Image (cartoon, grey):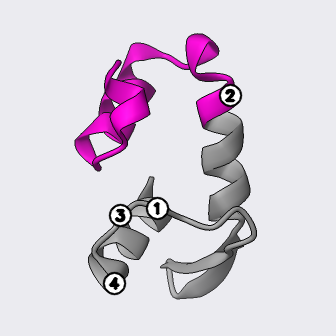
């Protein structure tokens, strides 16, 4: 979620190319996150996601998570 929020803040959109890797900093260490793959997999498996995860994704602007 942090990687998606960072991407949205930087680009102004939640449309992420499948091959995109977003680097986030946690406790002073950089961590690469395969954001495009994560979102693609999450969308295809949305029926198995918890309500909390779907709500968090929808709050960031992903329309498919709100449905």
Query: How far, Cα to Cα, is label 2 from label 1?
Result: 15 Å
Q: Does the magenta stretch include residue 60?
A: yes
The circle drawn on residue 15 is 1
- Residue carrying label 3: 5
The circle drawn on residue 45 is none
- Residue carrying label 2: 44
Instruction: Name the N-terminal-most of marks 4 and 2.
Output: 4
Q: Is residue 13 left or right of residue 2?
A: left
Instruction: Name the N-terminal-most of marks 3 and 4.
Output: 3
Identified at 68% across, 75% down, the residue is 21
- Which is more foreground, mark 3 or mark 2? 2
Q: Observer-nearest residue: 25 or 60?
A: 60
Q: Where is residue 62 in the image (x, y as percent from the top left)?
A: 37, 43
- Which is more foreground, mark 4 or mark 2? 2
Identified at 60% across, 33% down, the residue is 43
Instruction: Name the N-terminal-most of marks 3 and 1.
Output: 3
Q: What element carries label 4?
A: helix
Identified at 67% across, 49% down, the residue is 38
Q: In which quarter of the image is residue 33?
A: bottom right
Q: Where is residue 11 in the image (x, y as percent from the top left)?
A: 35, 81
């Amino acid at each position: 979620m942090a990687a998606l929020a960072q991407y949205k803040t930087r680009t102004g959109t939640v449309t992420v190319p499948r091959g995109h890797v977003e680097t986030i900093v946690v406790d002073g260490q950089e961590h690469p996150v395969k954001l495009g793959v994560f979102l693609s997999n999450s969308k295809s498996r949305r029926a198995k996601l918890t309500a909390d995860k779907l709500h968090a994704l929808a709050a960031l602007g992903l329309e498919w998570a709100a449905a």
